[in-house]
Amino acid sequence: MGDVVTSRDRSLDIAVTGMAARLPGPRGIDDWWDSQLHGRVHSRRYTREESVAAGVPAALAADPDYVPVRGHLDDWDRFDHEFFQIRKREAELMDPQHRWMLEVAWNALEDAGSLPRAGTPVTSVYASMTGSGYLRAMIRGGNVDPGLLDDMVHGTEPDFMASRVAYRLGLTGPAFAVQTACSSSLVAVHLAVQALLGGDCDQALVVGAGFGYPQAGHLHQPGGVLSATGACRPFDRHADGVIAGSGAGAVVLRRLSDVTEDDPAPYGVILGTAINNDGNTKAGYYAPSSAGQERVIGAALSAAEVDGGSIGYLETHGTGTRIGDPIEWAAADAALRGAGARPGSVAVGALKASVGHLDAAAGVAALIRALLVVRSGVIPPVAGFTERNPLLEESEGCPLYIPTEAVPWPGGRPRRAGVSAFGIGGTNAHVVIEQAPPREPAASVAVPVPASASASASVEVPVPRERLVLLSAADPEALDRVADGLAAHLEARDPDLGEVCNTLAEGRPALGERLAVTGRTSAEVAERLSGRSGVSRGSAPVTGPAPVVLLFPGGGTQRPAMAEPFTVLPAFGRALDRCLAAFGSPLAERIRQALFDPDFPADELNRPGLAQPALFAVGHAAATALQELGVRPAAVCGHSSGEIAAAAVAGVFGLEDAAAFITARGQAMQDCPEGAMLAIGADVKRALALAEEWGLGLDVAAVNGPDSCVLGGPVEEVDEYLRRIGDTFFVRRLRYTHAGHSRLIEPALPTLTRVMAGIELRPSALPIALNVSGRVVAAGTVLPRDMFVTQVRQSVLFGTALDSLAAHLPGALAVEIGPGRPLSPMAEAAGLSAVALDQARDMPGSAVLAGVGALWTRGQPVAPAGGGHRTRLPGYPFAGPHSVAPEALASPEPEPEPQPQPEPSRSPVPVPLPEQLGERPEPESPAPPADPAEAVARIWAELLGRDEFPADADFFEQGGDSLLIIRLIRRVNDEFGIRVPVREMLARRTLNGHVALARRVLEADGQGA
């Protein structure tokens, strides 16, 4: 029977949009898949010493029938608990399966570009795990604090795993535990598909884990299913049973119709699923049933509306048992042949041959492997296969064959495969998958030049263009791993850099530790990441973004083509066009030329009549564009003519009025006698005293800080000052033809007074730090008209203004809006953090993109990416600390004889030793301390996992919860032999409140000092 692709109704197809796994073998999916193509076996044979150290009883490890082999998972006990905001002690008590599920679930959602955020689809969770040997190990020792039992149960039992994932990852769809033994996670896939088709959710996360604690071998029993040789050989002549394996896997599912062209291409598509149970028509509860397995495969093919002739690969359950394998082979043969499969057309896969039996995770792991087969078009061998099991039916026309090496997918498309999982007790599951539908390659789109750039510019610019790459992690070490992993990926794969940027900006969360880098190609970004050259790095404040102060430079900072770097801001071109429209022609066109032509005459631009309007236009447009990116200023401050831009951004001037006044200001100053200005790195009193000593009539134009000022006056006197000063201290002549804020400018004042008379000033919408006074005036203030006139002549008290801003907005971030970064050092000297939006001198590549990146690394809510195609990138590189509960560790010595316990304990079980609980030793004497402050603080530290708290710290805000508060009350009661009222302890949430309550109850009992 042939299959016609167009005959299927694709409205019921489910896309696998993301996946992640932590399996025996290489850590990354790509490297792990390569190991599968090479047929590698990832089991480990433990030494006797390793087995005993892991917790295997010495007598068992020495038993001749003990087989010390397992599909081994390296670093099984590592968990990044801080990433998930889980206390260290709570993390220790969690079964490793719960931990792994959190990490692979995060990676899978990350891979799908669908981590929880605004607009994320409603996501359900289907989770499966092996029974918790970790819990049994903790309880077996008998030294368990009853107060820990809730944490132990919630962190180890299957009931709580799905809801824990939903809670920690912020997922709002239904959360289910699915437990059908070895078929659990593939049954979970079936249920997730049904939920998506039924509308219960828009996205489903299926996650499974399998782990037996301790990670060790097994005792072989003759006739049992566990291998005597320690090798799992499905369908092999030498098959003698299965070995256990450790691991976890997760897939993210969505309706195919909901996947957009901008999403990464799905790994594959689920066409149909089915589940059933054998019932009692088999040899026994543990026995498999060929009839049940055949029925479930046929039902899945029917649900998929495809025939067996279209299936080219079958990922089997494949346990490697001499009886189970022939039963599964016969069932698959009958089901596929009956559905039209041709002889020798279906390659058999068996994941367990490589990694062992992952139990509850086996189904989802097998699905991941099959998805990699249909995506890549390469069929891997069955690892370690030697020759066919003679018990397999030699039926004529059998469609099944066993690949012994990696081979290309034979035949045409679409590539389709089946996946089977069969659970002890007879719950069977089968899934039919297909490669993802092909997509048309994305057309290369030219990037338009902003209208402001040049009237004669080409309508296209060559690609590639500069891009901003944003990376983040939860801690600095993880950020280094993220950067190194991305660099290696970019170097090896050379993906489209635009898709990389979109993926990072839209599909990854913005975590606390951040790094930003710019580049034109993946290779360029990889090189910068590898060497950490040209990158911005910072931390987002945990209390939220710092308040932003926008700083606008004045005359002397202008340069030809100074607007060009800002064109990377999406809204800059439109904002600049609006700004230039407010200037009259022909000035507007001349400003445009000066802003974009690198060969524009510098002498003309250095004159106030053009410099001041040009700087205003750039500053106002860039500030507007930055606000559209998400930055919200808390205050503004401008230096000299920059104060007009600051006032306009704060709403004091309308745009047209601001343009009119800055035009008049520049021209009126230009009509004054020419002069010059010197920036001097010295105290203003000393700098001015030298001028007076030399008989030079210079004025103080600006005081920028304790050791920074500007003097101005006639050109010849400035030249004489410059000649005499030599190298006494730093001196630089400004690129300006006039001496602003000096007596030479006084002729401009009457003109400016007349112009200002026709302008209506509005109440400020933002606080402004003023040049004339150095004070910060509050939002809502109506500034006097004459201030903007007298400001032209008076000294600019910029240093004082910055000091006032630092006091007004502690912890503020100063963002310099204009060419270069002349104001940033002054802001830093005043105690403000500073970022120059134009970082041309500090960063390679696009200066302003680098500036935006620097803002993002400081926690500012900039959103530079506007959507587009996304791609697959390396997932978050979890590498948390090793974490094992002391209660679960094997005792290296024989257990001592039980000893009588001291009376103060009210626990019905023996008091745990401090090293068993991982807590500090408690006083042996029942006598309470004289002052409860030390004891309550110590108990807080033990329960919350930190050593120091301020007196007003809130117990719940520090990580406490309802279970911990009960443990706290019990510990305080036991410590002092008192009964603290629960209601009052809950009401007094702070450390000093708990201390005061304990002290009051002590005094009431006559125990106080």
Image (cartoon, helix red, strand yellow):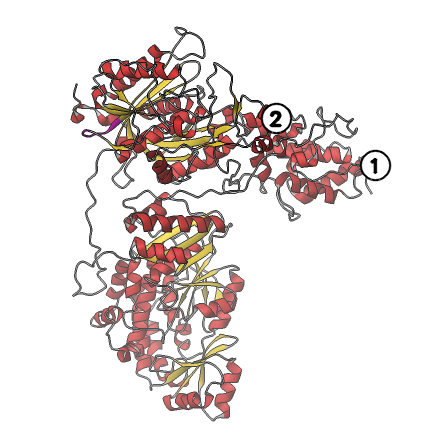
Position above or below: 771 against 693: above
Query: Which image quadrant is residue 933 in?
Result: top right
Residue drawn at (20%, 24%), measured in percent from left and top?
A: 8
Residue drawn at (31%, 79%), measured in percent from left and top?
A: 668
Question: Which stretch is magenta?
Answer: 411-416
**Where is residue 653 shown, x and y percent of the image?**
35, 65
Residue drawn at (21%, 70%), measured in percent from left and top?
A: 589
The residue at which mark 1 appears reads as 1006
| Quadrant into which the C terminus falls | top right
Left or right of 681 in this view: 338: left
**Element type at marker 1?**
loop
Instruction: Say which of 687 and 658 sits in front.
Output: 687
At label 1, the amino acid type is Gly
**Element type at marker 2?**
loop
Position above or below: 496 against 30: below
**Where is residue 15 shown, x and y percent of the image?**
30, 31
**Where is residue 309 shown, x and y percent of the image?**
21, 21
The residue at which mark 2 appears reads as 57
Say which of marks 1 and 2 sits in front.
Answer: 2
Position above or below: 411 against 263: above
* Residue 359's disc number: none
